Image (cartoon, grey):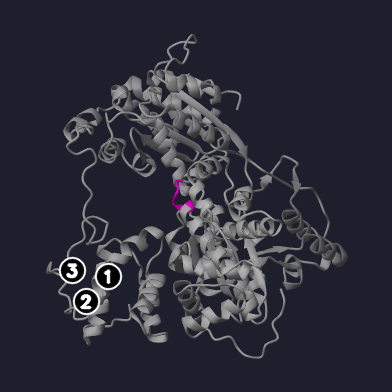
Amino acid sequence: MADPGASSPAAGHVTGFLAALRQAGITAPHQKQQDFLQTLSAAPPATRRGLYWRARITLAGSKAEIDRFDPVFDTWFGENQAGVKPPDLDSEGEEVRKPDSLHGGTVPLPLTPGEGTGQAASSDDLLNRMSPRRANAQEQALIKRARRAAERYLPRRPSLRLKPSHTRDVIDLRRMIRAAARHGGELICFRYRARPMKKRRVLIFVDVSGSLKGLTPDYLRFARALGETSAKVEVFSFGTRLTRLTDSLLNGVFDRALQRVAAKVEDFEGGTQIGRALSDFFAHRQYAGLARGAVVIILSDGLERGDPALLVHAVQRLHRLAERLVWLTPLKRDDDYRPVTRAMAAVAPTLDHIGGAASLERLAAEISEWTEA
Amino acid sequence: MAKDTRSKKPDFTSSTGVTAVLEEAGYLTDEGLATAVQLATALQKPLLLEGEPGVGKTEIARALSTALGRDLIRLQCYEGIDAAQALYEWNYAKQLLAVRADGEKAGVDDVFNERFLVERPLLKALRSGPGAVLLVDEVDRADAEFEAFLLEFLGDFQITVPELGTIKAVHPPLVVLTSNRTRELHDALKRRCLYHWIDFPEPARERRILELKVPGLTEAAAASLVDAVNGIRRLSLLKKPGIAESIEWARAGQVLVDGGNDWPTALRRALGLLVKDQDDLETVLAEGKPLLRAVNG
């Protein structure tokens, strides 16, 4: 920042505003702040509205940041704030109230979901169940097996990019000309490029509701094992609502990830509303695109408490987008399994495959059976 | 793109000026977007636009090129796009002939010069005389690695060709990037851009847009149409109709009304132009009936 210093009250106010934005979680980097200050001198705003747009356009970087930006702007430049005193950043006066979490200072914290309803598990219970019991040697071997099988058998598609190759797909003129120029313009041999095969994206939905008590950590381990292959993997959990786990589950130490997951997943034992969770998935445009051409794996017993019609609807939609839709259920223990619950029987015809998920071993075996890819 | 012959230079020094200039080009904007365009020209920075599909992200680039009388160069992004399609490519056939013709004299350097360079959109935007309007459309469709190719261009308006050196823009182009938010863009890219989120327009502006784009539409019909569209946007739909859709819907409705239908019937028949998903259609037909019935001209 071209240090405005505290030379004038206005400059001090702007500095304070920028600091408040940072506290609210808007990571406007140096360059953006400079743009903002440059704007103020190059095109000084005539109105409060004009200032708002200049600040928002230069400082905010996404829709989410805009949502956090607005309350901060109102606090600092709101109509009744004309006489705001130059802020003392260390004090916690009304004007510079420390924002709770990332929501900006003026947004009240939402109530804990399920509070007082007995729907959500107490967090102690949650942590106990999710507490990192280190996988024993046998389990680790199984995880490794699942990972290897996935690396080998997950469905692929041709990459969109051409890479140098021995497969004679497209003549690689660039390399040929370089070679020819070295040999006095003589074309000595052909070179080729081809589209290497690339793994399809894998989208995993993990059921974390009460009916799957003991299995959740195994499912998360399985999801993580797939995440360690060369495929791009997205993980979501659902119970009564949908939570995106990709970042917390796939990055970092697993035990810690498990705890972070426990903290994120509010709906342990809150019942299963798969249909609603999947509908939520489609309601987010940025999520829905993830299913296109992907391999979708749903890990759930399919005991739907909500409206089965909603579930059928969502699954059909998922099937239309996905390359392959697979449902792995702990209820399937052998080939005689027939879906009996209303919801499961209704979606069964839509699924490409129903597999077993009663244990890690079974999950590893499921992946190994995907040889046709 | 039609070259503009007006001698008057468009006034981009205030948001009202921008609004007026764009309106002349057939694009109605609000203060936010107008300010964003004003700042993009004043600071000479790329402008990153996000928003629901069909709110006019792509259209603004077209309007700018018309208003400024500059060429519109468009780069449509897609998964797998790479430097050879976006920046530059060598003309291999020509190089090959040159190497053959020159025989032993030819070295590598001889065939890697300007004569053999094929311009792709970004390079073309750098080298077009008075500064073009460059539209990098749906940048979120390209994969994350591709953004790295854009960084040098967006930051300094220059491209480095290893064999030639750095090519810099004489007149920096006006760059508009659009994204549908199917994935989060990289911070390095966002840092180099001004950012604006385009919302659905307020009813008053959408009314004016409809009146401008749909010939013969009465004021009353436009007003009630906009109410209906806003009502439909409030239903829980998978894809909310954008402005582009409501314009098409109004146009089709107008045609059917001219053919002797009343508005509610016409709009119900033309509903496929507003809502383009079977599930959504059912939702609108089930819950949106009163909205359609209220439309009249």
Q: Position of residue A267 (x, y in %)?
A: 28, 34
Q: Quadrant of residue A168?
A: top right
Q: Crowding at label 2, few (<14), some or many (≥20) Cα neighbours within 10 Å?
A: few
| Mark 2 chain | A
Q: Give the SS element for disc 1.
A: helix
Side of A276 where A122 appears, left or right = left
Side of A220 where A83 appears, left or right = left
Q: Which mark is residue A96?
A: 3
Q: Earlier in the sequence, mark 3 or mark 1?
A: 1
Q: Which residue is mark 2?
A: A81
Q: Nearer the viewer, residue A264 or B268?
A: B268
**Disc 1 residue type (three-letter):** Asp
What residue appears at the point 46 percent right and 78 percent down from the top-left corner? Answer: B39
Name the dominant secondary structure of the magenta segment: helix
Q: Earlier in the sequence, mark 3 or mark 2?
A: 2
| Mark 3 chain | A
What residue appears at the point 33 percent right and 79 percent down from the top-left corner? Answer: A48
Say which quadrant the C terminus of chain A sits in.
top right
**Disc 3 residue type (three-letter):** Val
Q: Position of residue A225 (x, y in %)?
A: 41, 32
Q: Decide: marks 2, 1 in contact (CB < 8 A)?
A: yes
- Residue A130 visible in rendering: yes
Q: Position of residue A224 (x, y in %)?
A: 39, 34
Is residue A52 covered in magenta?
no
A85 above or below B112?
A: below
Span colored in magenta:
B232-236
Label 3 vs label 1, nearer the camera: 1
